[in-house]
Image: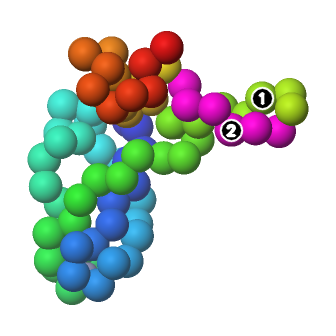
Amino acid sequence: MPLYEYVCQRCEQGFELLRPMSRSTQGVACPTCEAPAVRVLSVFAAFATGSNGESTPVAGGGCACASGGACGCAR
Ligand SMILES: [Zn+2]
């Protein structure tokens, strides 16, 4: 089961949750205040560190650029 990161919209507390992939887009409640939390993408999933130390976006790392390039990062 994949590990997802969430952040509470009210108290801004971040937390991680193991969830089935089929439920990854469903809303979750903050464990502290029970307000709705939103999913955030892991830095490690979205970026890779090159040999020169620069962090570069990885294709498909949570960006919608594969479906039109509207975000400007399509290469
Ligand atoms: Zn909260």
Question: In percent of the image, x 18 and y 42: which residue is there?
Answer: 25
Q: Is residue 54 above or below residue 43?
A: above
Q: Is residue 34 visible to the viewer in this orientation of the structure? A: yes
Question: In percent of the image, x 63 and y 32: which residue is there?
Answer: 56
Residue 60 position within the rendered picture, expressed as x and y whole percent measured from the top left? 42, 22
Q: Looking at this view, is 44 or 75 the one in front?
A: 75
Residue matched to label 2: 55
Dot 2 lies on which element?
A: strand
Which portion, as a residue range, is magenta? 53-58
Mark 2 crowdedness (10 Å alpha carbons): few <14, some 14-19, many ≥20? few
Q: Is mark 1 within 8 Å of ligand 1?
A: no
Question: In percent of the image, x 54 and y 25: which residue is there?
Answer: 58
Q: Looking at this view, is 72 or 50 the one in front?
A: 72
Is 17 colored magenta in this rendering? Answer: no
Q: Give the quadrant of the N terminus.
A: top left
Identified by mark 2, the residue type is Ser
Residue 73 position within the rendered picture, expressed as x and y whole percent measured from the top left? 44, 27
Q: Is residue 17 visible to the viewer in this orientation of the structure? A: no
Is 55 colored magenta in this rendering? Answer: yes
Q: Is residue 67 above or below residue 46?
A: above
Residue matched to label 1: 50
Which quarter of the picture shows residue 31?
bottom left
Mark 1 crowdedness (10 Å alpha carbons): few <14, some 14-19, many ≥20? few
Residue 38 position within the rendered picture, expressed as x and y whole percent measured from the top left? 23, 59
Q: Looking at this view, is 72 or 34 the one in front?
A: 72
Q: Image check: 71 left or right of 57?
A: left
Q: Looking at this view, is 35 or 49 the one in front?
A: 49
Contact flag, marks 1 and 2 (Cβ < 8 Å) = yes
